[in-house]
Structure formats: C-alpha cells, structure tokens
Image (spheres, rainbow, N blue to C red):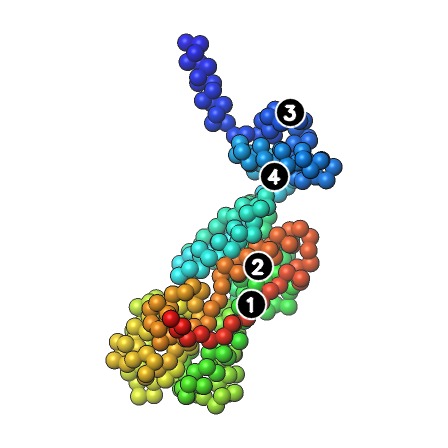
Amino acid sequence: MDRRAKEKDDDTSAKERPTLKTLAFMTGLGVTTVSRALKDAPEIGAETRRRVQLVAKQIGYRPNRAGVRLRTGKTNVISLVLNTEHELMSFVSDIIYGVTEVIADTPYHLIVTPYSRSQDPLDPVRYLVETGSADGVIISRTQPNDPRARYMLERGIPFATHGRTDMGLVHPYHDFDNYAFAGEAVRHLAGMGRRRLALVTPPVGLTYYDHTVNGFADALSEVGASEVPFNTVSIDHTIEQIRMRTAQLMRREDRPDGIVSSAAAATLAVVAGIEDAGLKLGRDVDLVSKQSSELLHLFRRELFVVNESFRLAGSELARAVLGWIGGMDPGSLQSLSTPGGVLPYRG
C-alpha cells in the first residue's frame, strides 16, 4: 500500500510543471537568483546564468503565463489576426513562419486569431484589446482608413499592419510596393509588343488595391498601351468565378493580349479561362503574376512572375511589434519591400 502510494506521488510529481522553485532546488540557488538569471540580469555572473538557463531548457521550464501577467501586466503573446477565408495559397503558413522565426528567442508566443467573412474585422481586435489577451497585434487586409488601426492607436496597443493606411496617423507597417509591381508588369508586357492590357485587381477597398491600380494606370500612360477593363472580378472571387469571367473576356473581339494578375491563386484560374476560350498562353496572350512561392512556373512555363515574400513580411511585422513594445518610435518601424523584377521560366 505504501509502495503504491509512493508510486502515485512520483507519477504526480513527474506531471507537474517545473517552477522557479524546481530550478532553485536543482541548481542550489535562491529563487530570486534563478529568476534574474533567466532574464539575463547583468548582476548575475555569466556562468551562473548559463547554468540556470541550461537546466531550465533540460527540464522544460516555461514561465507561468498567468503569473507573468499578474507580476508584469504582460501576456508575452503576439496575436496575428487573419481572415482565413480570404488568405490563399502559402500566405498563412509563410507569414506565421516569418513571425515565429523572429520571436523564437524571445519570451513571446504567437496566437492566431481568425475571423470569418461575415464578421466585422474590428471584432477580433476589439476582443483582444478588451480582454488584454495580447501585448501586440498584427493585422492584414489593411484599408486606407482602417478602423482597427485607429482603435488600437487610441488605446495605446502596440500593433503593425501588413499594408499601409492613409489616415495621416503614424504606426508600424510592412508592405510590398504594389505600385512598382504593376508598373514593372505593364512595362514588361509592352516590351513584348502587348498593347491591350487587363488587370486582375486586389480586393476593392484595401490600400494595395489603390497602389496597384494607380501603378497600372500610370504605366499604361507611360508606354502608350490601353486598358481592357476587367472589373467583374478581383483576387477575392472564387477560382471558378475568375475562370468563367476570364473565358468570357477572352472570347471577345477586343480581348486583351496581356494580363497582370495580383495573386498566384487567381492566375491559375485566369490561365484556365484563357484555355477554355481556345487560346494559348504565350502565343495569344502573355501574363505577369505576383507569386509568394515557386509555384507558377511548375504550372505553366510561359508565365512571367514577380516574387513577394510573405516570410519576410512576417519577420518584419514581428520585429515592428516587438520594437514598439520595447519602446521604439513607431515611425521608425516601417518597411517597404520592392519587386525584384519580372522573371521568366529559367529551367
């Protein structure tokens, strides 16, 4: 009976989460010393810090999040707010990879806060702020006058946006230069002799819609090409909708001989629509598309691509949020990546 009770006690102990007291016992140090060593406090010797941190890693010690919040008012959580119905292809996995790569060596953890098409995009942000669930927030699908950014600025919540706003308010962001992308795509197609160009746009109402459309229009004027309107779809439409409407467009007498696409997923549908209309990519029409992974040339070698890295975006957004939490000026935490040129298939 005594032996069984002892075995039960041993099992219970094995399942208990290691605490500062556990670390103190195992290292022969005081709880306060252990706590400071884990925080790399300079008054603790380097060898002591190394030993404490090694033991902590070996036994799987993690700070109790509830306790940290009680002591410091912090959660050690960064929340990435995503509309998962709209985010296609590799966006979600790549941006999460980029964020976690940056926070891996910090006390911070990432949580993904999803919301649906039917929800107000402000709802998940309001929940995070009102419940104090995160120290910092990352949002995407940024609008020129974005109520989420204004809400968090008014409440002093560190955040970063994937995309820029146009509210005259300073906040951290990372963006891709979509004005430059559209311009480079138009100039490339014009250089191939294409004169009637169509654009598959980002979703209307998002900031990068304006950047893309303006870059497209300005480049058309620059090269003397004309636009074939294609405003019945955006990259937010379903694959089937884009395929069907592309086929309708390409059956017209005044069809485009060049297309610029704002996303790889839409490009798959556009190519299907071109082929449904009995036309051949690279002969009857050329297409320049953004992509975030090495996918499109595996699909059709005739495509031309411009690469955008969502991993880089995730990394830059994480650095921006951590920087603001750490007291840096929000205006210094803004970054813009530029296109690396229009690329053909290289074998």
For the point 53% across and 76% down, which residue is it?
180
Amino acid type of disc 2? Glu
For the point 59% across and 48% down, which residue is it?
135
Disc 2 is placed on an element classified as helix
Q: Which residue is mark 4?
A: 69
- Which circle marks residue 27 in the picture? none
Q: Quick one: label 1, few (<14), some, or many (20+) residues within 10 Å?
A: some
Amino acid type of disc 3? Gly
Q: Which residue is mark 1?
A: 337
Q: Quick one: label 3, few (<14), some, or many (20+) residues within 10 Å?
A: few
For the point 41% across and 13% down, which residue is it?
4
Whole-percent x, y for residue 95 in the image: 49, 57
Most distant residue in the right direction: 43
Front of the two marks 1 and 4:
1
Specify which label sits upstream in the sequence, 2 or 4. 4
Specify which label sits upstream in the sequence, 2 or 3. 3
Disc 4 is placed on an element classified as helix
Front of the two marks 4 and 3:
3
Disc 1 is placed on an element classified as strand
* Residue at mark 4 to residue at mark 3: CA–CA distance: 27 Å
* Residue at mark 2 to residue at mark 3: CA–CA distance: 41 Å
